[in-house]
Image (cartoon, grey):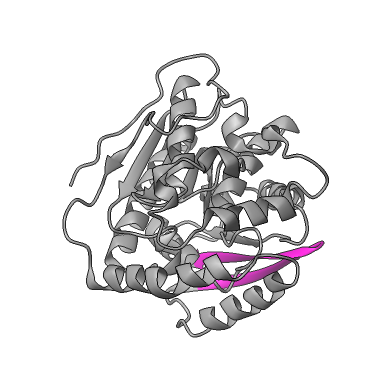
């Protein structure tokens, strides 16, 4: 099915007030209107029957986060290592990264690169858990992908942003052309995708060629989502879980600073954006709000919605048919974003 693109055409600043429960600006398009795959239905059942009830029952705090992190990491090790890639470990001060390249592909960063920031509620996941989706993007784009294991809770979200900016600086120092770099991330990593671009611009670094948010968290104001219809529809993400994460990572020293949320930033002049979310997930709210404000700021953007899927489905099961299709669409977007710079080099 051919998707319709939502493109920003208006100038000026976007409004700061949250969208109401009845207003649905820039609602995006449904990409998959047909039947869902068997693996997709199994994943949905697991989220509804096991993961969702667990996350709604177990509190998220300083005591439970380390236990959850170990459990998620052990589960991820049951997944076979991705094929067709080459990996290089990189250690920076306080955190580590991994460069993932398609086997036999170009090793020169000047030809282009992705900066990938994993999800996990700023609390769990890392290089191992997201290696499969990173490998899938490397194979599909033919570009090296820098997978970043930034510092997480119980630290601050601001510290996570600092690490991601440092990872971007590393790419630039090693010869990457910002006009051929794309930032991408899922869930909390989607937040960091935008926050890293915004922070980079604030400190004088060049913006990347494009941004990709996969089920991204973009508004830390959990109270604004209380009346949103998908609060009760999301297969496994509870609003109280989001509240706990924000309290630990952004409200520990006082009230939430609205400026920390990417939806409240000065968005004019940002690079093109691709947003992908599940139709019934809680963070569709964030995607709709961001698409609305990007459009108002004149930033080209596309919001794609996937029916019958769960939050961050493409990072949970990258081999699922719907995930493969979504990642193929991301790869096409990435290639389109970096090709102008390549043509300029060879002209």
Name the main secondary structure of what is drawn in magenta.
strand
How many marks are shown on the rendered structure?
A: 0
Nearer to us in this view, 239 or 5: 239
Q: Position of residue 209 (x, y in %)?
A: 52, 38
Q: Where is the C terminus found, in terms of image quarters?
A: top left
Quarter residue 284 falls in = top left
Residue at image position (25%, 35%) is: 4
Q: Position of residue 130 (x, y in %)?
A: 53, 67
Residue at image position (60%, 71%) is: 58
Q: Is residue 327 above or below residue 298?
A: below
Q: Is residue 19 above or below residue 158?
A: above
Residue at image position (63%, 52%) is: 243
Q: Is residue 299 left or right of residue 66?
A: left
Q: Position of residue 324 (x, y in %)?
A: 32, 62
Nearer to us in this view, 176 or 64: 64
Quarter residue 84 falls in = bottom left
Magenta residue check for 1: no
Q: Is residue 334 above or below residue 126?
A: above
Q: Position of residue 41 (x, y in %)?
A: 27, 69
Magenta residue check for 100: yes
Residue 287 visible to the viewer: yes
Q: Is residue 297 left or right of residue 330?
A: right
Residue 272 visible to the viewer: no
**In the displayed image of the protein, which residue is found farthest to the bottom?**
78
Q: Is residue 70 left or right of residue 268?
A: right
Task: State which region is magenta.
Answer: 86-101
Residue at image position (44%, 28%) is: 292
């Amino acid at each position: 099915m051919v998707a319709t693109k939502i493109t920003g055409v208006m100038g000026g600043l976007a409004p700061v007030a949250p969208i109401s429960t009845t207003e649905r600006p820039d609602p995006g398009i449904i990409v998959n209107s047909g039947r869902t795959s068997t693996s997709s239905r199994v994943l949905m059942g697991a989220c509804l029957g096991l993961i969702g009830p667990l996350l709604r029952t177990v509190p998220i705090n300083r005591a439970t986060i380390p236990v959850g992190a170990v459990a998620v990491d052990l589960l991820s090790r049951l997944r076979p290592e991705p094929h067709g890639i080459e990996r290089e470990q990189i250690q920076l001060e306080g955190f580590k990264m991994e460069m993932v390249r398609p086997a036999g592909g170009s090793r020169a960063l000047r030809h282009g690169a992705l900066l990938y920031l994993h999800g996990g509620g700023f609390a769990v996941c890392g290089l191992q858990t997201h290696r499969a989706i990173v490998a899938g993007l490397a194979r599909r784009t033919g570009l090296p992908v820098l997978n970043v294991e930034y510092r997480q809770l119980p630290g601050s979200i601001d510290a996570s942003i600092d690490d991601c900016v440092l990872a971007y600086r590393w790419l630039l120092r090693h010869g990457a052309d910002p006009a051929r770099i794309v930032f991408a991330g899922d869930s909390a990593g989607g937040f960091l995708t935008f926050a890293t671009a915004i922070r980079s611009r604030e400190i004088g670094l060049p913006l990347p060629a494009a941004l990709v948010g996969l089920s991204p968290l973009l508004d830390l104001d959990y109270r604004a989502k209380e009346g949103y219809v998908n609060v009760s529809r999301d297969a496994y993400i509870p609003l109280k879980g989001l509240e706990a994460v924000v309290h630990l990572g952004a409200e520990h020293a006082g009230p939430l600073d609205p400026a920390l949320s990417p939806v409240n930033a000065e968005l004019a002049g940002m690079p093109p954006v691709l947003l992908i979310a599940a139709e019934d997930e809680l963070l569709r709210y964030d995607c709709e709000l961001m698409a609305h404000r990007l459009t108002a700021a004149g930033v080209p953007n596309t919001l794609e919605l996937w029916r019958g899927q769960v939050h961050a489905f493409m990072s949970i099961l990258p081999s699922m048919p719907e995930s493969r299709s979504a990642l193929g669409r991301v790869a096409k977007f990435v290639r389109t974003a970096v090709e102008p710079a390549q043509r300029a080099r060879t002209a």
